[in-house]
Amino acid sequence: MRKVFFLFIGLLASHVTIAQVKVQHLMTENLPNPISIDAVAPRFSWQLDGGQARNVMQTAYQIKVTDDAKHTVWAPAKVNSDQSMYIYYQGSPLKSGEKYTWQVKVWDNHGKSSQGTATFRMGLLKADDWKAQWIGPGQEEASRPSPLFRKGFIVNKKVKTAIAYITAHSLYEAHINGKRVGDAYLTPGYTSYNKRIQYQAYDVTNLVQPGANAAGASLGSGWYRGIYGIGTRHEIYGKDIALLMQINITYTDGSTATIATDDTWKTSTGEVRYAEIYMGSTIDARMEQKGWSTAGFNDSNWKNAVIGNYPKDILIATVNEPVKKHETFKAIKLFTTPKGEKVIDFGQNLVGWVKFNVRGKAGDKIVISHAEVLDKEGNFYTDNLRDAKCQNTFILKGEGMETCEPQFTWQGFRYIRIEGYPGDIKPEDFTATAVYSDMPPTGTFACSNPLINQLQHNIQWGQKGNFLDIPTDCPQRDERLGWTGDAQVFSRTATFNMNVHNFFTKWLKDVSLDQFSDGSLPHVIPDAFDNGKPTGGGGSAGWSDATTIIPWNMYLAYGDKQILENQYNSMKAWVGFMKSRSHNNLWNTGSHFGDWLFYTRNDDNDGTAAITSKYLIAQCFYAHSTQLLINAAKVLGKTEDVETYTKLLADIKDAYMREYVTPNGLISSDTQTAYAEALEFDMLPENLRAQAADRLEANIRRYGNHLTTGFLGTPYLCDALSRYGHADAAFRLLLQENYPSWLYPIKMGATTIWERWDGIKPDGTLEVPSMNSYNHYAYGAIGDWMYRTVAGIDTKIEQPGYKGITIKPTVGGKLTDVAANYETPYGKASSHWKIENGNFVLDVVIPANTTATVYVPTKGDSAVTESGKPVTKAADQIDGFTAVNIGSGTYHFSTTN
Ligand code: BGC
């Protein structure tokens, strides 16, 4: 056997200083100091900072948990282990609403130790912890203005803590004493509302005051009862609009008080006259009830709220990071279009809304419309928004400078059209704010080719624009739905750019809850089409596979076994569905989206359209999902399932070979998607794989080094090529600047990923308005290949969550400098390679408490050095790489020719 790795950890360790290890980044259920945890056994995680030292590993840890009265509730013995992620609490039962402090002491392999402290508070664990009652406006709501609710209360003792628990049917914004509670938007977020509704907890200790106080909230129709789900569907989850709010106050003398919604709360309406996700909002400042959430406000002409008998046993604490405001953009240009319209360009296609300051007369009406692109003539273009109006209307009250900001809606746009503006428009008065789930950023990718850097920018903005509490297909037209196929296609890339652990944990729960009883998955999650009734269809190959692909991707990225445990039955049910619809394990039934939006020329007379049989694709995904189920069963120790599904997988592949592949290895759909999936899902026997890769490469050349794949082939294309020795072809695709390619939209000025390869055609005309989003992340799935193959940062599958790291750069595409940084669950990993004077140079960072194998590309007689010292001889190369095992720290490798 050939010797692959060289262990010289000891050698490297000898020349560095040993610094103090530091424990940091303490998380409870992946959140820093959370204040509403539902999990009865929350999990603790932390990171180690090894400073300048190399090879820092944790050797032991000890945890202690105390309650607010400083009583110990869990104090297990020191554990000799390097585990620093997901350690389950196992002490005495944790109490609803209680705050706890946990400490961890860690020891490392250099004889150092460090201690850290964090806190967490439990959520309201039982339905009867809610003293609040659901309340609604109880009145005719002709045009559905946003209802306001308020209640005065007295605080006559010193407050130790005040925690507000709030949720709504559908969106709320809460206030205490005239101040906004928290900085989250579009709360309580979107879940399968008929099965579970999130509430948020806020520490409002600093908002309550001695003496008279007031609490209140305004509501919007949102996902719950608004217009949503393609076209003008509405009231998917109910007609009612309702608030549930409770403030639990603990005084310093130990006594408590609860302020809770009931029919003594008062209700009215204010300036938000209309608000819909797709349509936008109408704000009439003349109707503002100034100071409505302050104690001194006179609510004598407000009505009493009406109690609604809605369930409280479906309330859950919030798992994912809430939606918040992020980047702001100033106008880069104000101009008049050929049609004579006043338009502002913000320079970036973003998702959020525009706020502006204006002076005018009472009754002046300003309408702000939104667009992603201008048409060929340079006019403001909104046809692709379909039935979504995306207009915010503001009616001024005429009292000096007014600030206009929409409510309970969002838009996807780069341009706004301004109508009815009093006086001259001053672009500096307008600000666009990006709004998305507050996921911590985790990755950067930059290289020597500015077009690729723009591609990375566009991928990240596709993610920012579409990770708005749920993963949406697009953020602008009358969809904005949790399309399952799009989400699975992009899920691995998403893990690199931002920490999507909690984001997908929450969404996957809705996947399993909304999955149909036959095991198929509705096309969108939450199921806005069917609401539990299997009428809108589901079970499309590549879409329903979100059930298996996303949990597995999350497991790889975060090493979190619980995701697999939670999703296992759902994964199994999906495989069961495909089996039940197959004949002799050939799945050739049902309706499928196929390789959605694959390359097809408008005037395709000579058969260049790259059509891949839908059933062939279905068979590939049947195999792939079965493989992922086997993987999950192995991780979870379900040996019987491993056996059963391994046998099934062999049958599925046999059926595929019989039906679709000639003995010579020609696949009946001779397309890039067919070969990429065959290779990536290991559909072919070993002896036919290399020739399949060659056929794929030849196919790409036939199309003049262009890709022809749609949603289901694109994520696998470059990986299949580089895995089978055709990295050069993968780079040719990546660097292709003509349609169809990743860089073509960039040459056409794109700042996000488009739904179609030719959203704007080479002649400047636009694709059909019925299906043409300029912010659809699916094709951004190439980001995964850029991080994992070009920069070469990956997790070892057997040590998921980057406990074991691989750094294996791929040189090509005339790139001379590639740098990727990635915040793994253990801390920062980085791979930065350069070609300097013809030599390959690689700087690597590996976080403490992990190990890595670095593959330095070497050829011929080149030798590798690390920080100037030789680490190996040319003879020790394998497959064009010299492999080196290392521990944590920073390293500088170079090769000399
Ligand atoms: C969405 C997609 C989705 C598709 C299903 C479209 O309307 O925008 O991205 O996956 O329908 O084919």
Image (spheres, grey):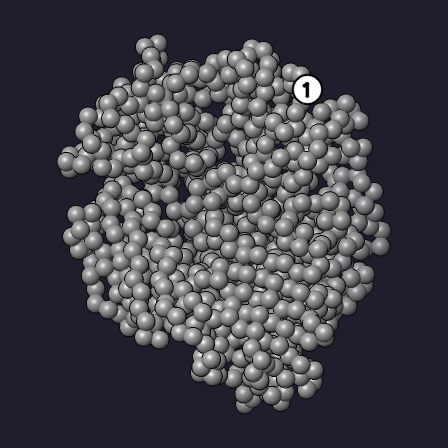
Q: In the picture shown, does residue 128 fall above or below 339?
A: below
Specify whether 233 is left or right of 73: right
Q: Residue 584 appears in which quarter of the rendering?
A: bottom right
Q: In the picture shown, does residue 158 fall above or below 272?
A: below
**View extreme (right): residue:** 605
Q: Which one is nearer the viewer's eye here, 256 or 774? A: 256
Specify whether 378 is left or right of 827: right
Of the 4 image quadrants, the one containing the C terminus is bottom right
> What crowding class fits label 1: few (fewer than 14 Cα within 10 Å), some (14-19), or many (20 or more)?
few
Location of residue 431 in the rendering, given as x and y in whole percent from the top left corner: 59, 32
Q: Is residue 832 visible?
A: yes
**View extreme (front): residue:** 17
- Residue at image coords 35%, 75%: 110
Q: In the picture shown, does residue 878 fall above or below 57?
A: below
Which element is circle 1 on? Answer: loop
Of the 4 image quadrants, the one containing the N terminus is bottom right
Location of residue 170 in the rendering, given as x and y in whole percent from the top left corner: 43, 31
- Residue at image coords 41%, 57%: 563
- Residue at image coords 29%, 35%: 205
* Tag 1 residue: 424
Q: Amino acid at mark 1?
A: Asp
- Residue at image coords 61%, 27%: 429
Specify whether 710 is left or right of 69: right
